[in-house]
Amino acid sequence: MTQFINGLMRLRRGPWEMLATILIALGVVMLMQPFAMILFTYSFIVTLVGTVMFIIVSHFPE
């Protein structure tokens, strides 16, 4: 866990890509769940933020 936090602080690609991927997956899960309308409402924004974040982070150093 400490290595993950250090990677985030040093702007390394690996931890940030994992965080962006988790956001994308969370947005898709929010989109497909049938229970809470508020989650469905924000699912597109969460997926979009994760996708844009992944594009930006892919330019970070290894």
Image (tube, helix red, strand yellow):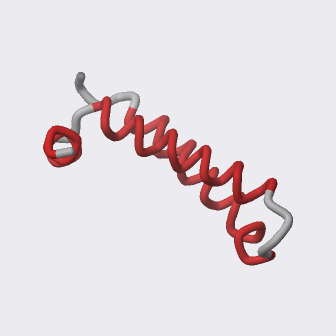
Nearest to the observer: residue 6 or residue 49: 6
User: Residue sitting at 60 percent across and 58 percent down?
Assistant: 46
State the image coordinates of residue 52 (x, y, percent, origin top left): 53, 45
Q: Residue at x 31, y 37 (%)?
A: 15
For the C terminus, the quadrant is top left
Residue at the (77%, 74%) spot, across then down: 36
For this orientation, the residue located farthest to the top is 62
Q: Quadrant of the N terminus?
A: top left
Query: Vertical placement of 22 versus 41: above or below?
Result: above
Count of labels in the image? 0
How far from the left and from the top, in percent, is residue 32? 81, 54
Is 14 displayed left or right of 52 in the figure? Answer: left
Taking the view exactly as shown, the residue that stands out farthest to the right is 34
How far across and down, in percent of the image, does residue 44 sit? Answer: 71, 58
Q: Quadrant of residue 24?
A: top right
Q: Residue at x 77, y 67 (%)?
A: 40
Which quadrant would residue 6 be assigned to in this image?
top left
